[in-house]
Amino acid sequence: MHPEHRPGQTGDESTLSTPRSLARLIRYARPALPRLIAGTVAALAASLFALAVPQVLQVLIDGPLSTGDAAAVLPAALLVFGLGAGEALMIALRRWFVLTPSTHVEAAMRNHLYAKLQDLPVGFHDRWPSGQLLSRAVSDLGLIRRWLAFGLILLVVNFIVILVGTGILISINWALGLVFFIACIPLWFAGFRFEGRYSALSRRSQDQAGDLATAVEESVHGIRVLKAFGRGKHALRTFAAQAEQLRGTELQKARLDASIWAWLLVVPAIALGACLLVGVWLASQGQLSAGELVEFFGTATVLAWPIESIGFLLAFALDTRTATDRFFEIIDEENTITDPEQPVRLDRPTGALAFEGVRFRYADAPAGTPDLLDGIDLTLVPGETMALVGLTGSGKSTLTALTTRLYDVTGGAVTLDGVDVRALSREELRAHIAMAFEDATLFSASVRENVLLGRPELGGDDPDVRAEAERVLTEALAIAQAHFAYDLPEGVDTKVGEEGMSLSGGQRQRLALARAVAAKPAVLVLDDPLSALDVETEALVEDALRRVLQGGGADGTGTGTTALIVAHRPSTVALADRVALLEDGRVTAVGTHAELLRASAHYRFVISSLEEEARRERTDTGIITVVPEAADFAEASASGTQGTEGDR
Ligand SMILES: Nc1ncnc2c1ncn2[C@@H]1O[C@H](COP(=O)(O)OP(=O)(O)OP(=O)(O)O)[C@@H](O)[C@H]1O
């Protein structure tokens, strides 16, 4: 994460007003609107039933009770009972109406967010911390669901009930109603002040929760490193400091909430007290009947909850507005790497890959620095294997990422069979060019599904397709020397990845390589995918790869694949037909390994540092790995010779 640019942080607040911001939810809520409206009507009916009870009491007190008509009391009591039962029924109906549609809205929003995250380019994911994305996808959307099902409806209904109730109060006695209304005015002022301050705090706390999620995610992923370096306590301190910040913000929110609650409880109580004084005086003057006094206070009591709840509902709406803004920050993000309107189709590309005056710089590269890639010209003929060599940080991985448009060139063009890769749809481009990376990611799925990830057409139950899938899988695992997959507890159906079995770095790399090979691409781009393999396995993989790349295929029937391989070991260079040397943002030499050794001093320097690195790796392996030495010793004893690390 680059500290100078922290997306999703306080300060990115939307300039829309709260109602306009929340109105953006309508496009997702539209299918649920009929049931949400039905839920609102049910909630309103429940409140109106409650408001009707004091009216019945007034009629009862001023009518039958004052005239002593006992026969009329029972129907009035039954009416009050019926109104109570009706209120309960309507509340149950409201819940029933709104529960399911709000979960549909949440699911639709979550799916859209996920699709958008999949579509956005790697450059976006470089900038955004994963915890911020996670908190938007989980807690923000959960909040929006609860608000749609509960907060929004109650806000609308309670507002209407306050209006209707105040109207009833004024109709009973306008002077008394006016006293109640005026006494409540401080509430509206408090509400407005509350909104501004609470919005800012709400935004801060939701962003801090996102940062906390990032911290948890990073420490869970990096748990081995933290343990190995004994940095667990340090990580805990950093986490605790972040958690403390969030706690502080939550406390501020709670204090603000408490202050509005205090107003909401005290002001209506004062208003009722004032009304009681005025009401009793009016009754004593004969301007108000006993029944009307009871009706007034009954209605005011029914209004107490809607008035009190407004503060909470306002806070809820503001939290939801923040969650909505945070959601739309992602949805509104412009995708800079998109499909052309009329994509060119390449049915059977030969695999001619060319970089033509390619320039590239990362969006966050400091101003004034030269482009990382500063006019790359390089052509790979179909079936050729080209190794890319350069000092660390020279831009090799970046150059390979341009082939499948993980990033777009900032100048020049990358072409496949003479067609600019930007003219193809991304799906088609990525079907023609497959990549394997040093950092091999496996998904929580079986070995089979992981390896056949790039061949969706090989799914399904058709026996012929299944046989073909089996053949491709077997061949890919053989080339990548991933026979270990058959020895896993459930063979190639064993679940691997985060939720499955833990595999070693070398095993994961071999499965990722098998995945790239199984995609049967016209061009294979390998960004140091063999770094975690031991020397012998690497040699076997390279041998098998060489056969495939040269057109032999594992079964001898292949047609040859163009390959661009980032080389970090001299042995990888040996795999290549030609080598390209990357230096100061340009390809400064292309030729066979022998030619470059003769012609380029920089190449000799790079190769000797790769050899030095490889020697160090071997020595390290010799020191750390005890078992092979013991095996060597046993072998040497049996054959009467002394095996050494250098012999292998
Ligand atoms: N996502 C990114 N955003 C900004 N700068 C980046 C990004 N990725 C890489 N860089 C910078 O670009 C430069 C080239 O990185 P790259 O990974 O392409 O080099 P490389 O030659 O593959 O290095 P190595 O041999 O160590 O893998 C480095 O200085 C790196 O810091």
Image (cartoon, rainbow, N blue to C red):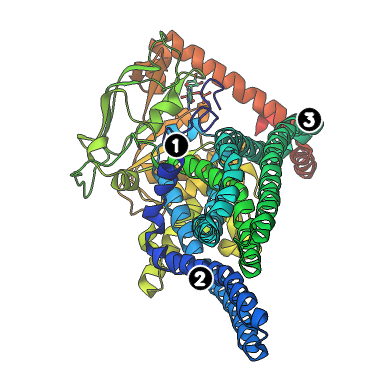
Quarter of the figure that contains the C terminus: top right
Asked which secondary structure carries label 2, the reply is: helix
Q: Which residue is mark 2?
A: 45
Q: Which residue is mark 3?
A: 237
Q: Position of residue 15 (x, y in %)?
A: 42, 32
The outermost residue toward the bottom is 71
Mark 3 residue type: Arg
Residues packed near mark 2 inside 10 Å, few (<14), some (14 to 19) or many (20 plus): many
Task: Find out whether the residues at labels 2 and 3 contact each other: C-beta distance under 8 Å.
Answer: no
Q: Position of residue 468 (x, y in %)?
A: 38, 65
Q: Which residue is painted at 38% across and 63% down in the image? A: 31
Q: Nearer the viewer, residue 163 or 181?
A: 181
Q: Nearer the viewer's eye, disc 1 or disc 3?
A: 3
Q: Position of residue 68 (x, y in %)?
A: 68, 85
**Residue 100 is at least partly visible in this image:** no
Quarter of the figure that contains the N terminus: top right
Q: Residue 134's image quarter?
A: top right
Between the C-alphas of marks 1 and 3, the distance is 40 Å
The disc at residue 526 is: 1
The outermost residue toward the front is 285
Q: Which residue is painted at 65% across and 86% down in the image? A: 73
The disc at residue 566 is: none
Judged left or right of residue 438, residue 633 is right
Mark 1 residue type: Leu
Task: Find out whether the residues at labels 1 and 2 contact each other: C-beta distance under 8 Å.
Answer: no
Q: Residue 492's image quarter?
A: bottom right
